[in-house]
Image: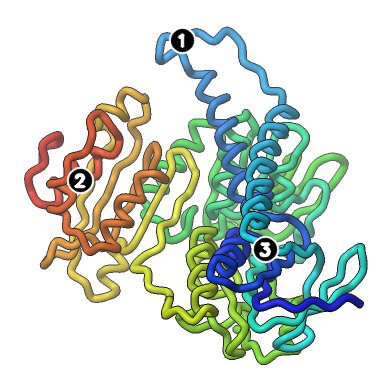
């Protein structure tokens, strides 16, 4: 059995793992990264990136069917779904090959296979080519998460997880989406735009749990316009494949009901990939839910073992994993890096998009902060009107005493891009006045940030207060 020696080993080549490997190598460490399936991880291969490719294609298809509002007559538009999928795969391949090039350019050795700890300084890697042992000084665990599979809805040809929903060979006539979280709503939007009859069944009081009801109501209204049905407060009992379709049994207000569809997407959360790593051979502590306990440098209770991304506390977001990756790699190099962000932005690529960062009015109140909420509608923005995308608003949450921005919520076109400025504002402790006095280009959607800040300081120009 081959044995290799290295300074740092990284397990998992997703947005956390590959960033950690590159940063560690830049800091002078000899690095091996182990990946059992895809370079780029779930995000680049079967998550963030391919879903956005399908979202884009579906959005363009739906928009083209309604171009008459711009005076553009499109007599007929058809979907070649095999080409849509080929486009998606092209996007994925371009990015994953790019990550491979980055790893090679930073002198990171890639080992393909499944890793398991033998002890706190030794990993065994199994692959189709055999077994090898890697001995290391430090390790960064970045193994990500996987969809939760329910005992009454086992994944199969027609009962799908998110990966299955992304890789369908045809556009289904009907689909039931179990779970109205981010993934469920995004993929429901994809297939609704392509003409699928979509039924969303959510157990909570509302979709996109934790989001402002003013925003979720706009998303629900958009889904309804596309022919989708959203039902909340239900208990889904089971799903069963039968003769080319799936029957879903659920309970609504005490009454048992059945939904029948070509496919069912089960999207009820993700769980950390920590159960098959051999962590029991180390001293690493896990929570009851399988998350790794770490300190502010992503260090576990085993001083040479670090963990980042979906397997530790916090939102399961690619950009959070990448941030933590740099902290862990720098900590190994002896730098004083710690997790020190004021906030982490989150985005839902629904229609319209949602982006949030920092406090809401409700969470500020829970934290004992006297806060004010002010908003400005997309319907009052020239660029949004020209785009014919006027649903939504920008909302700022400010400290009443100081005027410092402590949170923001956006729903509308390009919300995912606009949230960056507000994240910087919170991290920099800027006030609403700072943003109001910053000249923004016209006509742009970004002007809305300035306009909302003007509302916050009491002298709006383009709406009547």
Q: Earlier in the sequence, mark 1 or mark 3?
A: 1
- Asked if one can make out residue 72 in the rendered structure from this viewpoint, the answer is yes
Q: Where is 296 relative to 261, above or below? A: below
Q: Disc 2 on helix, strand or loop?
A: helix
Residues at marks 1 and 2, CA–CA distance in whole angstroms: 33 Å
| Left or right placement of residue 399 versus residue 190 in this view | left
Q: Tell me what residue is drawn at x 62 percent, y 53 percent.
A: 102
Q: Give above or below for 171 relative to 130.
A: above
| Crowding near the residue tagged with mark 1, few <14, some 14–19, many ≥20 C-alpha atoms within 10 Å | few
Residue drawn at point x = 65 percent, y = 76 percent: 8
Question: Which residue is rendered at x = 49% and y = 84% of the image?
Answer: 295
Q: Label 2 to label 3, Cα distance in Å?
A: 46 Å
Between 26 and 94, the one lying in front of the other is 26
Residue designated by label 3: 108
Instruction: Work out whether residue 6 or residue 56 is closer to the camera in this orientation and state it.
Output: 6
Residue 175 image point, x, y percent: 68, 41
The CA span between labels 1 and 3 is 51 Å
Q: Which residue is mark 2?
A: 452
- The answer to whether one can see residue 256 in this image is no
Query: Which residue is under mark 1?
Result: 72
Q: Quadrant of the N terminus?
A: bottom right
Q: Is residue 337 above or below residue 266?
A: below
Q: How is the image coloured?
A: rainbow
């Amino acid at each position: 059995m081959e044995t290799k020696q290295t300074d740092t080993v990284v397990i998992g080549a997703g947005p956390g793992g590959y960033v950690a490997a590159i940063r560690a190598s830049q800091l002078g460490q000899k690095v091996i990264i182990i990946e059992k399936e895809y370079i780029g991880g779930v995000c680049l291969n079967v998550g963030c990136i391919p879903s956005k490719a399908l979202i884009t294609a579906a959005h363009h298809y739906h928009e083209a069917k309604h171009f008459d509002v711009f005076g553009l007559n499109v007599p007929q538009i058809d979907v070649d779904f095999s080409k849509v999928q080929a486009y998606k795969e092209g996007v994925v391949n371009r990015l994953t090959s790019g990550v491979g090039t980055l790893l090679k350019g930073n002198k990171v050795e890639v080992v393909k296979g499944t890793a398991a700890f033998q002890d706190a300084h030794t990993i065994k890697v199994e692959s189709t080519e055999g077994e090898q042992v890697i001995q290391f000084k430090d390790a960064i665990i970045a193994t990500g998460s996987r969809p939760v599979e329910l005992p009454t809805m086992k994944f199969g040809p027609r009962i799908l997880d998110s990966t299955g929903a992304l890789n369908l060979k045809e556009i289904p006539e009907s689909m039931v989406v179990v779970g109205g979280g981010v993934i469920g709503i995004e993929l429901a939007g994809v297939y609704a735009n392509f003409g699928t009859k979509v039924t969303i069944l959510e157990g909570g009081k509302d979709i996109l749990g934790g989001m402002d009801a003013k925003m979720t109501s706009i998303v629900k209204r958009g889904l309804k316009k596309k022919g989708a049905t959203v039902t909340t407060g239900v208990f889904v009992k089971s799903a069963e494949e039968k003769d080319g379709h799936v029957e879903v049994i659920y309970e609504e207000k005490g009454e048992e009901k059945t939904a029948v569809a070509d496919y069912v997407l089960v999207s009820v959360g993700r769980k950390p990939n920590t159960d098959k790593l051999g962590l029991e051979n180390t001293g690493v502590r896990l929570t009851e839910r399988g998350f790794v306990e770490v300190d502010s440098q992503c260090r576990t209770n085993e001083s040479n073992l670090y963990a980042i991304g979906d397997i530790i506390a916090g939102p399961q977001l690619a950009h959070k994993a990448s941030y933590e990756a740099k902290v862990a790699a720098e900590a190994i190099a002896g730098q004083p890096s710690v997790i020190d962000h004021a906030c982490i932005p989150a985005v839902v690529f629904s229609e319209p998009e949602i982006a949030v960062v920092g406090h809401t009015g409700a969470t500020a109140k829970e934290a004992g902060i006297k806060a004010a909420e002010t908003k400005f509608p997309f319907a009052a923005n020239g660029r949004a009107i020209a785009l014919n995308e006027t649903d939504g608003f920008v909302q700022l949450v400010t400290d009443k005493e100081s005027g410092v921005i402590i949170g923001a919520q956006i729903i509308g076109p390009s919300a995912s891009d606009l949230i960056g400025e507000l994240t910087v504002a919170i991290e920099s402790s800027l006030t609403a006045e700072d943003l109001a006095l910053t000249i923004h280009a016209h006509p742009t959607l970004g002007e809305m940030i300035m306009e909302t800040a003007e509302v916050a300081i009491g002298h709006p120009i383009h709406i009547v207060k």
